[in-house]
Amino acid sequence: MASQDAIYRFGPYELRTRAREVYKNGTKLKVRPQPFQILQALVERAGDVVTREELRQRLWPAETFVDFEHGLNTAIKELRGLLNDSASEPRYIETLPKLGYRILVPMEAVEPPVLAWGKEAVRSQRPASEGAPDTRGEEHPSPDRVGINSDQPLRREDGGIKPASAGMPPLHRRRWAAPVAVATMMIVGVAVYGQWSRWRAQARAPSGRVMLAVLPFENLTGDASQDYFSDGLTEEMIGQLGRLDPQRLGVIARTSVMHYKHAPQSLQQIGRELGVQYVLEGSVRRDADKVRISAQLIQLKDQTHLWSRQYDRELGSLLTLQSEIARQTADEIQITFGTPKHTDVVVPSGSSPSLDSEAHDLYLKGLYFWNKRTVDGFQQAIQYFQNAIDINPNYAQAYTGLANSYSLLTSYTEAPGERYMPKARAAALRALELEPSLAEAHTALALVVQNYDYDWETSEKEFRRAIALNPNYSTAHHWYAEHLMWMGRFEEAFEESEKARQLDPLSLIIAVDYADILYNARQYGRAIAQFHAIQEMDPNFPRVGILIGSYIEKGMFPEALALVKSPSTRENLRWYWALQAYVHGRAGQREEARGALRKLEDLSRREKIQPTVFVRAYLGVGDNERALSCLEKAYAERYSEATTLKVDPMYDSLRGDPRFQELLRRVGLAQ
């Protein structure tokens, strides 16, 4: 039986397809939609193999470019936890390597119970998740464009942004959203993410531009501590090829290709997920002062190996070797299309072939820790980049790494800008002094002058210069999209974000910042759906503030409050109480809001709390005076949150105050 009404029993478990529920000995278990669908596919074909490709087609339709392997592996791991199963000694789910999965136990299919008023009545009751989406007045843009849409008008005739509250009833009059909204959003989320991926796929390879992925070089030393070296080689090869001929050759960014490190995916699947026609793959073995690199270029449409080489060199000539591999890769691709060979590879002077090998090794270690994107990682990266500079004071790329580490450390620690940003600016300027054509250095400086100096004109000039120097640098497109968003230029922001995704299609941070653009553009329903789609791929992905804010603006206060009270938010008591005050206040629950504010004030007597945290709490209780005072302090201490003032709906209640408008002027974002 494989109907939508089937009930399957195996061991102590029962799977109910219509309700999409799993029970163990009569107790309902918690299971996410994707793991449930996989389990349903397996039990419907008990004893038979369900291939990975069949699961992909069932859960991720064609042209939906998501990280399928990561999503599937995560779902299978969750199912094994649900069933108390083991991959090494399976009782329920057997893995057939590189093929698929199979249910091992006998399956009993039974008819669903019929209620007293008849079977047809049961079948006519659709679960809430199958109902019509609760769009609450939002219109959905057509697939061929990313339009500007909102729950209320976005722009005035003078070009400024209309407050979300204009023409709206008071917040305490909004009815609380029905629970069906969340179920609906979960379904809409996958569809929105899939549609977003299809837009990306349509735009990925413009006419005449070939897409290439440099797969993670395999570390053959047998020593995991040398992963930084093979990963660094991969990243530097991406950079070399990206600068080679960006008008005709697009190169996928590091974040996306690292999904395939130690992964069993076929080349066809990688090509489909990344939208590339060629892959460069290889291995590296390092021994004392020597290095052996094997590399091969493969054309995916027919699995042709265009060339394969093995190189044995001194470690000090590694950068020269990288240039040689990049040149040969480009030459072979261009020969395939009948175009002349490209003989010149641009190697920034800051990473010249004569670079000290010890300094370069320290730089690669810095890159490795920077890419962890954690506070500890940034602090270790700073140390390694500084050590590389101590050995070679003319190392431009090490200065760039230092600048970006200080900038992101500011954001990740919620520190005032004056703590780290002057160091970030000094490092970025030194990098540009050494190498004016280094796109990464221009991008680093653009971020500093935006978040610390509030110099929007210089920031835009630096972002555009970086993109002109290296159109394949995804971080420049990503951060420039945020820059455009803060300025309220949403259509341009969507376009730039799309370019970033073309180059880094599996990056979740780019995907979540796309949700942030939707939120600030007042497209709350789509922002919610987008974030839910991201959570399907990584349930623990941070930045839930975007989702909380979208819930609030949609009037979905119970959902917002449930998210605020989740275990992950409780880990940070400052935000836990600040967000409770804000959500309760926006819901019209003034006593609860004031109670949360008192908890936050009590906490502030034991530890220092940033003014940006208090802003939300004061806005929640309607204390605009103290909210404005905290914003003034945040501006004086150069908190990067000042960049959000023009567009964040949270500040709509302050927009009519002349003091807020004056603050906008000083931040360079006057209407």
Image (tube, rainbow, N blue to C red):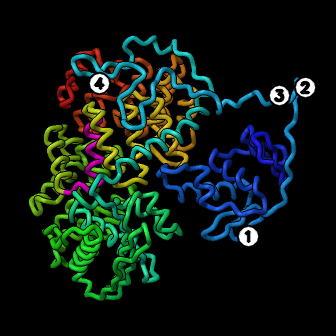
Label whose residue precedes the other's in the sequence (1 or 3)? 1
Q: Nearer the viewer, mark 1 or mark 3?
A: 3
Q: Nearer the viewer, residue 182 or 419?
A: 182
Magenta stretch in the rendered image: 470-485
- The local secondary structure at tag 3 comes to helix
Q: Which residue is mark 1?
A: 89
Is residue 360 visible in the rendered structure shown here? no
- The local secondary structure at tag 4 comes to helix
**Which quadrant: the C terminus?**
top left
Q: Is residue 472 magenta?
A: yes
Q: Is residue 403 above or below residue 310?
A: above
Lateral position of residue 375 relative to residue 260, left or right: left
Q: CA distance from mark 2 to mark 4?
A: 64 Å
What predominant SS class does the magenta segment belong to?
Answer: helix
Q: CA distance from mark 1 to mark 4?
A: 61 Å
Label whose residue precedes the other's in the sequence (4 or 3)? 3
Q: Is residue 147 magenta?
A: no
Identify the amino acid type marked 1. Answer: Glu
Whether residues under marks 2 and 1 lie with C-beta atoms below 8 angstroms apart, the answer is: no
Q: Which residue is mark 3?
A: 120
Q: Nearer the viewer, mark 1 or mark 4?
A: 1
Identify the amino acid type marked 4. Answer: Ser
Q: Which residue is mark 4?
A: 629
Q: CA distance from mark 2 to mark 1?
A: 44 Å
Q: What residue is at 49 percent from the left and 62 percent from the top?
A: 269
Q: Is residue 228 above or below residue 512?
A: below
Lateral position of residue 557 relative to residue 508, left or right: right
Q: What residue is at 65 percent from the left and 64 percent from the top?
A: 100
Q: Quadrant of residue 353?
A: bottom left
- Numbered tag placed on residue 116 in the rendering: 2
Identify the amino acid type marked 2. Answer: Ala
